[in-house]
């Protein structure tokens, strides 16, 4: 039975002996990422290989020891607002650079970069507001176009 895709998960340990479970063109990428606590997006299955992504890094693997977790719809590269949460966090805007799974708490932690520097705090989903839309814009928008305003006359300007 195939899982419903896309889904999220981690490879906390090397799934099996050797690298025969990895597409031959992707061995170097996989060896640099697995095993780890990185949260991968498993996007599709082509009948032989699962297609996975971690940010811009993409790779293919045979069905293997995948530890499925509940995703939170954040992706590497997403622009996020850091919520204050009653002064618990310093509010700001940044970009997600790492997504990691903490086994002890069974929670996903996010590293956010501001001005090219990673923040020392790791955030939870409730600390962040996603500013990047992942929706497809296939449906027409029903917004009304902005109405053009006429320039202010001297009389209108003086009223301001």
Image (cartoon, grey):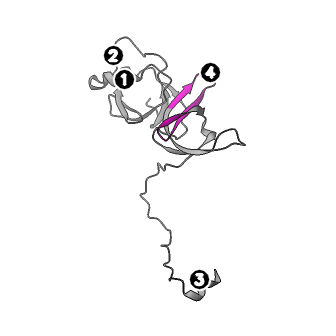
Please report contact status of discs 1 and 3: CB closer than 8 Å, yes or no: no
Q: Residue furthest right?
A: 86
Q: Is residue 17 visible?
A: yes
Look at the image and give the residue range highlighted in magenta.
99-118
Determine the CA span between mark 3 and mark 4.
Answer: 63 Å
Q: Residue furthest left?
A: 25
The residue identified by callout 4 is: 104
Closer to us: 86 or 36: 86
In the image: residue 29, left or right of residue 99: left
Q: Nearer the viewer, mark 1 or mark 3?
A: 3
Q: Which residue is mark 1?
A: 30
Instruction: In the displayed orientation, state which residue is furthest to the bottom.
Output: 155
Say if 25 sits above or below 71 in the image.
above
**Place of residue 114 in the rendered image (x, y in percent of width and height, measured from the top left):** 51, 40
Q: Is residue 100 above or below residue 43?
A: above
Give the SS element for disc 4: loop
Q: Are marks 1 and 2 in contact (CB under 8 Å)?
A: yes
Q: Which mark is residue 157?
A: 3
If you read the primary sequence from the N terminus, does the residue marked by circle 3 or circle 2 appear first? 2
Q: Earlier in the sequence, mark 2 or mark 4?
A: 2
Quarter of the image that includes the N terminus: top left
Q: Quadrant of residue 55?
A: top left
Q: Between marks 4 and 1, how big is the CA–CA gap?
A: 24 Å
Chain-order first, disc 4 or disc 1: 1
| Magenta region includes residue 95 | no
SS under mark 1: helix
> In the image, what residue occupies the spot 55% across and 38% down?
72
Q: Nearer the viewer, mark 1 or mark 2?
A: 1
Residue at position x 38%, y 22% in the image: 32
Alpha carbons under labels 1 and 3: distance apart = 64 Å
Q: Earlier in the sequence, mark 1 or mark 3?
A: 1
């Amino acid at each position: 039975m195939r899982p419903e895709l896309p889904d999220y998960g981690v490879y906390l340990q090397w799934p099996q002996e050797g690298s025969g479970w990895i597409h031959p063109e992707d061995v170097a990428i996989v060896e640099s990422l697995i095993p780890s606590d990185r949260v991968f997006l498993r996007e599709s299955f082509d009948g032989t290989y699962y297609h996975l992504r971690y940010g811009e890094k993409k790779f293919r693997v045979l069905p293997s020891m995948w530890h499925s977790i509940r995703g939170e719809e954040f992706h590497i590269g997403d622009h996020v607002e850091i919520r204050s949460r009653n002064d618990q966090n310093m509010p700001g805007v940044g970009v997600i650079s790492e997504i990691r799974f903490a086994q002890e708490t069974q929670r996903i932690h996010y590293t956010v970069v501001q001005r090219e520097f990673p923040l020392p705090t790791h955030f939870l989903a409730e600390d962040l507001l996603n500013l990047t839309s992942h929706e497809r814009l296939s449906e027409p928008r029903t917004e009304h176009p902005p109405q053009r305003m006429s320039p202010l006359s001297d009389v209108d300007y003086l009223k301001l």
